[in-house]
Image: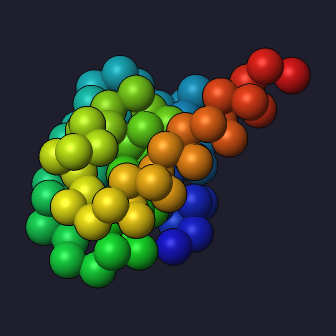
Amino acid sequence: MNLDDLLIRYFAATDLSAVSPAMLEAGIDRLRVDFGLATDRAQRFALWSLLFLLGAAPDLDVAFPEPADRDAARNFMDLMDRGSDD
């Protein structure tokens, strides 16, 4: 999944600063629905990652039944945290 494609799909823009608060909320709602319906592990991870970046991701225990997926999500969270320290 391409980030720009996801942003266009859920928010109709690649620049989230140009998105109104109402559009952002609606996009996050659609993203949560698609995440809940997704069965492909890679797709679920991509959608969860975007939700995480937007501050709207569900807890790992709820989001990922597979321990390997939870570990990957923790690694992603750590990488994002390290990147924000720079």
Q: Position of residue 52 (x, y in %)?
A: 43, 38
1 w.r.t. 10: above or below: below
Q: Is residue 84 left or right of residue 81?
A: right
Q: Is residue 12 visible?
A: no
Query: Residue at the location (27% across, 66% down)?
Result: 66
Q: Residue at image x 38%, y 62%?
A: 69
The residue lying furthest to the bottom in this view is 40
Percent coordinates x, y for residue 9 in the rendering: 39, 61
Q: Quadrant of residue 77?
A: top right
Quick one: quadrant of the C terminus? top right
Nearer to us in this view, 62 or 30: 62
Percent x, y of residue 17: 58, 27
Instruction: State which quadrant residue 85 falls in.
Output: top right
Name the residue located 20 percent from the left edge and 77 percent from the top edge.
Answer: 39
**Residue 83 appears in view:** yes
Q: Residue at x 37, y 53 (%)?
A: 70
Residue 25, position in %: x, y?
A: 27, 30
Q: Nearer the viewer, residue 68 or 58?
A: 68
